[in-house]
Amino acid sequence: MANLTELCLYEARDGLKNKSFSTKDLILDHIDAMESSRYLNAFITETPDLALKSADLSDDNYSNNTNRPLEGLPLGIKDMFCTKGVLTTASSKMLSNFIPPYESTVTNNLWNNGAILLGKLNNDEFAMGSSNETSFFGSVINPWKKNDKQAELVPGGSSGGSAASVAAKIGVGSLGTDTGGSIRQPASFTGTVGLKPTYGRCSRWGIIAFASSLDQAGPITRNVRDNAILLNSMCSHDPKDTTSSSKEIPDFESSLGKSIKGLKVGIPKEFYQDGMSDEIIKMWNNGKDWLKSAGAEIIDISLPNTKYALPCYYIIAPAEASSNLARYDGVRFGHSINSNDINEMYELTRSDGFGDEVKRRIMIGTYVLSSGYYDAYYLKAQKVRSLISKDYNDAFSKVDVILTPSTPNSAFELNEKCDDPLSMYLNDVFTVPINLAGLPAISIPSSKDKNGLPLGLQLIGKPFDEETLYSFANIIEESSNFESLDDIWWLK
Amino acid sequence: MNKLINGKTGDWEIVIGIEVHAQIISQSKLFSGSSTSFGSEHNTQVSFVDAGMPGMLPVINSVCVEQAVKTGLGLNAKINKFSIFDRKNYFYPDLPQGYQISQFEQPIVGEGKVIIDLEKGVEKEVRIERLHLEQDAGKSIHDQHPSYSYVDLNRSGVALMEIVSMPDMSSAEEAQAYIKKLRNIMKYLQTCDGNMEEGSLRADINVSVRKPGDELGTRCEIKNVNSIKFIGQAIEYEAKRQINLIESGESIKQQTRLFDPKKGQTRSMRSKEEAHDYRYFPDPDLLPLSFTDEFVEGIRKTLPELPDIRRKRFVEDFGLSPYDAGILVSEKETADFFEIASKNSNSKLVCNWIVGELFSILNKDSKTIQESPVTPENIGKLINLIDDGTITGRIAKDVFEIMIDSGDDPVSIVDSNDMRQVSDEGELDGIIEKIIQSNPDQVRSLEEKPNLMGWFVGQVMQETKGKANPKTVNELLNKKLLK
């Protein structure tokens, strides 16, 4: 039998349904892939024993015809999701010993739908970063290399492990979280499909908080159909999260193949940037052509406050983070360094437990909320955020989706931008405004740059209209003929 | 008229504003389902939310919101139909989230007022600035181990109302009257049990002094004073301390102080410079609170009769003096007791009996009215026995004493002890005749000393063990002796 890891989510699902192979066969192949791909450092915790145990139950369910929608499908989960009884670290030394006594709502939904946990995935510490280099457990390595096969590249971040594992075909899909682009940017860097749903679509309960008003869980998959299937099992209205939506959850998979004829696509002029590479512009133009050929109408639009999005984000997200991360004080759980003085205990614990990027954001956040600076920074950023939301509201009175590149560039080399936070932050220039506006957006692999590295297009949708995004994403996917990774150089 | 304090340099005026933290009566905490009952084993009423575990989220308890609105209405205050929860950030081991969820710029309740009752029936209005909802912190315990402190999170997340007054009080008595009135209103509303010993009601007192007519002086805040008595002591001490400082040429530094009940003194806790920067900002985990007019009006309909209105009714309907009515309504339980006792009885007599006989017994034994050994129903029956002439006022006191000891019904006490009033003229006549016969000297002296009539009355009472109807006895004696 061929290696079952070659099957994408829906193929594996159909194979299991048809009893072409057992869940155990599928899980064993994925465990093999996980173990032989440790060089990529995508997983922090592997759970092969738990997975095999669950596989037996799934096989029983298939034989009894009591199989659930995701029965027996192995998934990797970003280490920001609390998983009951399984180490959950947020890739931080601070939580390097933390085993939650509860399961996040989103992962619980997946397990209730029959999915199987393969392991916990590496990410930037507390999801702060765009290259997965801030993890206490080390960088994740992008399975993609340039044509010259030389330098190792970052997978993007913060959901770097989630994107890299899917690109390397370990697991049929993964979960990420996206606060400013943390799903879409790594998806773009690894040739995978990553969706950030509308804020409120998925419950945040049990997800380690970075910036509460921006955080949202989402799926990373090998293709658009898998993505739609996974999202369906993730979302639910959760009374434990006040910001979770009670809107009806449609069957996302059925929006694939729907006609987009007569629908309008907005092209925001503000996303054309000085020095933007020809390859990115070409990909963007290709995208417009594909959608036009499928019957959509292309319309130039303006999102005038786009240029303020990044500074606005780097005030609001650190402000919330500085408060959300205050609970890591060494008193009740996690890393702790004892002292006879309580303030010294806090200082020692937090100095040692947090990495540089997390400390940087806590300091920025503390500063912008301080008395005397609050009005000039935090309050002003909130006003700008409202203006950005209004830009999108106005735009969506004229168009059905907005098309942009996902990132201004392809994956860069390890250590290339580590010491230059500003240049690192610029990676999120196209993704951050969407979180500020709370909208759904998807990154679809669309072409390769001159070095053979993947580039993604981003589709932005109206609130709670992930269906239209999937219809459009499906057309881009079919039109682009993107060739997935074929070189498995990292295998020993 | 404001009460002034005489200093070396003349008269001083005290200015007092109070922040009260009142624990809301509710089954569960403000943002979690944990129980709020007092006195449970340490750390047994703590959910993952209360312990600030990663990924946990607060969910508002609607009962607490209703209680806050109800209290706002009871304080004649403006209900804000839109309000916001903010995070107040600071580090402390008994604050698991590293922030307290509170309300800062947009509280649930705005300006209101309370009428406080001072001596001799004087009333004064104290303005309320705001009322907001917030979570309580846990409790740090420092006296259980020589080198460790313990943390109990049972209280972490319990719902509090912070009620902030304007600086409208000018003496310890006014401050005490304000706390009593506020506590009483909340007890009437059943939104806070007002128990200061258990910490359900805590007060931070802001005190400053000034020469009459001057601008407000620099204030000091005295934190967490937990009894009405200590509030009085703390204010007296703090005002004198400030006056002495200023009169000796120093200035007052804004600071937070603590009251030491053992020494009766306040001492500095931290200066303004050391004050926390709480970095308030809207809590992104919670939606703003917003209500309709119907919601507020619905709660208004559930308001009980509040003390000021009840007092008015007692005066108008029962003919009580405003002073007596004020005493009765000043504790909800006393007013309730009175209403039960006077249901089928003479209200004025019931009031006199409660304020006089019953209170002196309760005071002697340091008991509250809820712990009264006599039920209100039995007080009512006792009053009826006096009112309809079944027993004399003197006998009533004996009956009352038996009621206190035994808790028995006064009617059965009177019956079984043969305590009924003797009004029968024939029976009394015989007794009087016998006394006249046996005391010829006294009868003779009566013409010179008319006061001796009282001696004859006493003899009759002694003979009848106090049961003789005093009116009948007087009539008979007058008829026989003053011909």
Image (cartoon, helix red, strand yellow):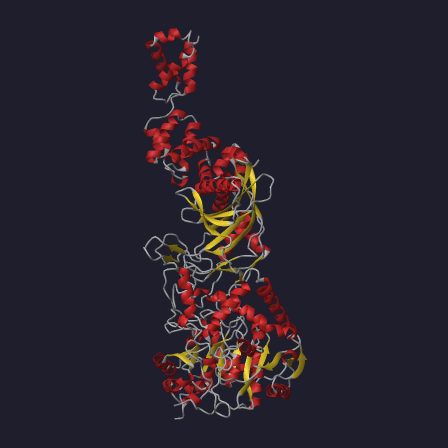
> In the image shown, does A382 or B120 lie closer to the viewer?
A382
Q: Is residue B173 above or below residue B159?
A: above
Q: Is residue B362 left or right of residue B241?
A: left
Viewer can see residue B302: no
Q: Which quadrant is home to the N terminus of chain B?
A: top right
Give the x, y percent position of residue A219.
49, 79
Above or below: residue B123 compared with residue A203: above
> Relative to B22, is A40 above or below?
below
* Image position, residue B63 (x, y; %): 49, 56
- The residue under the point 38% across, 23% down is B421
| Side of B144 relative to A297 (left or right) | left
Query: Residue B8 at what x, y percent from top left?
Result: 52, 35
Rendering quarter of residue B158: bottom left
In the foreground, B466 or A289? A289
Image coordinates of residue B18 in percent, x first then y, are 51, 46
Quadrant assignment for the C terminus of chain B:
top left
The answer to which of B232 and A400 lies nearer the viewer is B232
Left or right: A469 in relation to A77 = right
Q: Is residue B379 visible?
A: yes
Residue at the front extreme of this rendering: B249
Number of marks drawn: 0
State which quadrant residue B397 falls in: top left
The answer to which image quadrant residue B138 occupies is bottom left
Q: Is residue A441 above or below residue A328?
A: below
